[in-house]
Amino acid sequence: MEREPYLSVVVPAYNEEKRLPGTLERICAYLGKQTYHSELIVVDDGSEDATVRVAREVLERSAPAQSTWRVIENDHRGKGYTVRTGMLAAQGQYILFTDADLATPIEEVEKLLAPLQAGYQVAIGSREGVGALRLEEPWYRHFMGRVFNLLVRIVAGTHYEDTQCGFKAFQREAAHDLFNRLHIYGAQAKVIKGGAVTAFDVEVLFLAGKRGYRVKEVPVVWRYGENTKVNPLRDSVRMFRDIVRVRLNDWRGCYRD
């Protein structure tokens, strides 16, 4: 019988044939140094390039012996739906999702595992707070992030310093519970065109609060990527709309058992 993974790593990818090889090789190298059994899942968000082929080629040659891996192919429904697919498929005791550019080094997962081992159900990487490092980030992107965070606090009522860092870990039971309950980018998410940066993280963390889960915000190292897919105007509007929808969903009773 195959052993249960201690850690599952979920990597959502959309048109990442260039950045993904380096990311997967680094994750595989890290997992290969660990004594525990691990799982690596790449979820393709309907890419139009060779992301799927590249992912399989890299994992076939680089995945460590104590790891299992797979590549899941989705229609293009956006990052939220893509992450959800991987989180629900993962079977590790602890499940991490990380961005395909590995802006936060995989080694930082140890900072998130510590609070999970101590009893927290959710541990989120934060680019704010003592010990956090934001490297090579333009000042205007940092400003945009702080404005968005203020809006999240006002509209959604959360208290986190940074909801949008793409580096979050969960106990398996909490991950499956929370991602099964997503409404905005859940099972009914529609097929879309083009890139779409969303605020699905806000809904996840809002639900975590509603469900009574203990959440630990952990300062991490994060490096700004020059090839970011963020469109400042378009994505800011979409993300603000998402946090409003979270609040409206709550008022409508969508998050009740």
Image (cartoon, rainbow, N blue to C red):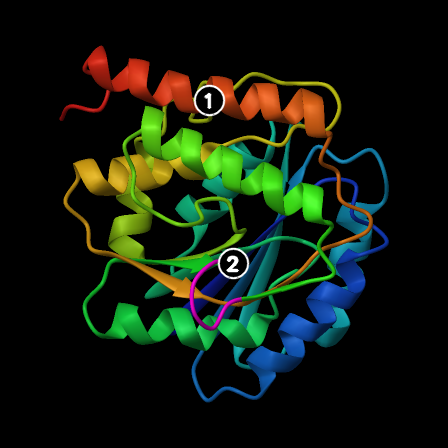
Image coords of residue 110 (percent x, y): 44, 77
- Is residue 251 found left or right of 88 in the rendered image? left
Viewer-side residue, 88 vs 201: 201
Residue 217 drawn above or below residue 17: below
Q: Earlier in the sequence, mark 2 or mark 1?
A: 2
Q: Is residue 24 shown in magenta?
A: no
- Which residues lie in the magenta part? 127-132
- Residue at 59% x, 84% y is 32
> What is the number of the mark on residue 149?
none
The disc label shown at residue 127, or none: 2
Pick whichever, 165 or 152, lies toward us: 152
Q: Let me know if residue 198 appears in the view.
A: yes
Between the C-alphas of marks 2 and 1, the distance is 21 Å
Three-letter residue code for mark 2: Arg
The reply, left or right, for residue 58 in relation to residue 11 is right
Spot occupied by residue 256 in the image (x, y as percentages of width and height): 15, 23
The image shows residue 186, relative to residue 170, as above or below, that is: above
